[in-house]
Amino acid sequence: MTREVRVRFAPSPTGPLHIGGVRTALYNYLFARRHGGKMILRIEDTDSQRFVPGAEDYIIESLKWCGIEIDEGVGVGGPHAPYRQSERRELYLKYATQLVDAGWAYYAFDTAEELDALRKEYEGRGETFAYNFKVRTTLPTSLSLSKEEVEERIARGDIWVIRFKMPENEVVKMHDLIRGDVEVNTSTLDDKVLYKSVDALPTYHLANIVDDHLMEISHVIRGEEWLPSLPLHYLLYKAFGWTDSQPEFAHLPLLLKPTGGGKLSKRDGDKMGFPVFPLHWVSPTTGETARGYREDGYFADAFINMLALLGWNPGTEQEIFSMQELIDAFSLDRVSKAGARFQPDKAKWFNAQYMHRKSAEELSAFYQPILKEHGIEVSDEIAGKAAFIMKERATFVSDLWDLTSYFFVAPTEYEEKQLKKYWKGENPARLAELREVLASIDDFSLENTEKIVHAWITEKEYGMGQIMNSLRLALVGAGKGPGMYDVTSFIGKEECLKRIDHLIANVKPLE
RNA sequence: GGCCCGUUCGUCUAUCGGCUAGGACGCAAGAUUUUCAUUCUUGAAAGACGAGUUCGACUCUCGUACGGGCUACCA
């Protein structure tokens, strides 16, 4: 029996979504689409202390920008609504007490302060405190206290949590789709809190298992940082009697910092000169801002392509993938095991590749706002054409203005270096000659102009470099820009002659 | 410290016992070129270490080293 593929991306709204999270969402999405399944967005806001307003909207907008579509979940709805855990809070206590009744969990009455003190005490002796089978009967829990006392404590309002009663000395055999078989002895594990007293909410572990079960999740694809809690999760499924419908697990390798050690963190980006977030972020509480790929000029498809290849490969030498191609090629068994160091240079390369492949129409949409900022009002067609001519030289849309400004603005100043080289000796006279040649051309198209001017240069036996560069000086004002005939045909005959006249009239030849 | 995961060019990676270890980014050189780029060609650059299994090991096993994760009433 093959069951319907249902995966979920389950972020915690504690801040902006980091690119590691985007990649996790992406892999979930690709997996879902590849298998004709559903992609679910669940918001795990069970940490009332770290909740950040605006984070949820940020997450949703990020996924949208990336082209990761949600089939069910927050913002979309679906048969298992609500998908925000804070709105499901009544649900969890029932499951937690069910575990207590079945002997899989127990009440613990320690306060956070008492536990802190205990940890310090152990530390002082050079030991590590673990809340586990060794100590649970010596601490104030429903395992050490009488039934009456437990009931009394609860009745009088003592604080309590529900902890999982981790079995002693059992081997949990697990399977991970990426890592294979993993075994852990339960004696090395501790009694995790399942239900918190501070905010009367479940912890991740409980909420996660309950919701994955209720939402009929078939595959849990998440970051490697969750691997250590997999045994607990296996045992929770067992304790609830849900082992038969338990999802399969896949733990993704982490994204590492470009230099130095450790996983990529939210603080790294701005320091190292690249964004770690998909979108620009402004903290609603501190006002702090962080750069985003979108605002830095990256194309969403290039960004996604780059991210997809960080920890996964198609097994072929193809590097450029559309979302659909990624969906068709994706498979979990080609996900690598080791952490991937994030490489900003490669992100730029991908963006340049996408830039080179964009059509004039696509580029126009990106470029128009920039042109407007410079006070240039032109048709989409003109904007697209300018961008299209120079796209091969650009990595970002923001590079285009420097590359194409002379299509729209005549030079008023001339670059020193170019002047020294091409505005001396015979150059001015030759340019004047060229002006007349150009003036005589009726069909000012790129091809025709090139044909006529080249024929003239050949006939006169002039140096191509000298002629073309003095023309470049007149039209561009600097030693840069596209092919000269791109410029002449773009700005047209009249403007062309005007710019030549301006140079001749206003700048005295050198020497 | 304990537990778990990992380890091929600087980086991302291919290789699922036969390798002259392939590709990409970056780097270097050359070619093309009216500028700047692009593009193309070429080059330098890797199996952490030690045992074992095997006719043969980058691939399998064990150990060591190194890296990473987890070790909260955070996810």
Image (cartoon, coloured by chain):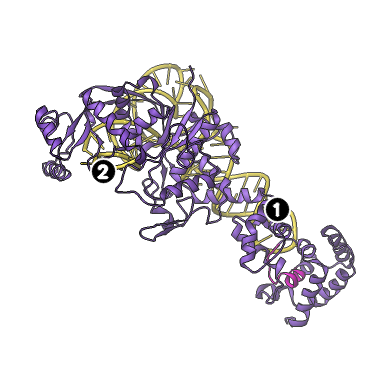
The chain that appears yellow in the image is B
Q: Nearer the viewer, residue A322 or A255?
A: A322
> Which residue is under mark 2?
A199
Q: Nearer the viewer, residue B38 or A406?
A: A406
Point out residue A319 in the picture as x, y percentages from the top left corner: 59, 40
Numbered disc 2: what chain?
Answer: A
Point out residue A246 in the picture as x, y percentages from the top left corner: 38, 24
> Which residues are drawn in magenta?
A469-481
Vertical order, A205 against A401 (above or below): above
Neighbour tally class for label 1: few under 14, some 14-19, many 20 plus, Cα within 10 Å: many
Rendered-image quadrant of the C terminus of chain A: bottom right
Q: Tell me the SS state at disc 1.
A: helix
Point out residue A117 in the picture as x, y percentages from the top left corner: 13, 45
One can see residue A317 in this view: no
At 55% from the left and 30% from the top, the residue drawn is A34
Point out residue B44 in the picture as x, y percentages from the top left corner: 53, 45
Q: Color used for chain A? A: purple
Upstream in the sequence, badge 1 or badge 2?
2
Q: Nearer the viewer, residue A105 or A320?
A: A105
Q: Can marks 1 and 2 be said to lie on one chain?
A: yes
* Type of amino acid at the residue the image marks with label 1: Ala
- Tell which tag, 1 or 2, sits nearer the viewer: 2
Numbered disc 1: what chain?
Answer: A
Which numbered marker is on residue A333? Answer: none
Instruction: Indicate yes or no whether the magenta region holds residue A465.
Output: no
> Which residue is under mark 1?
A360
Q: Tell me the SS state at disc 2.
A: loop
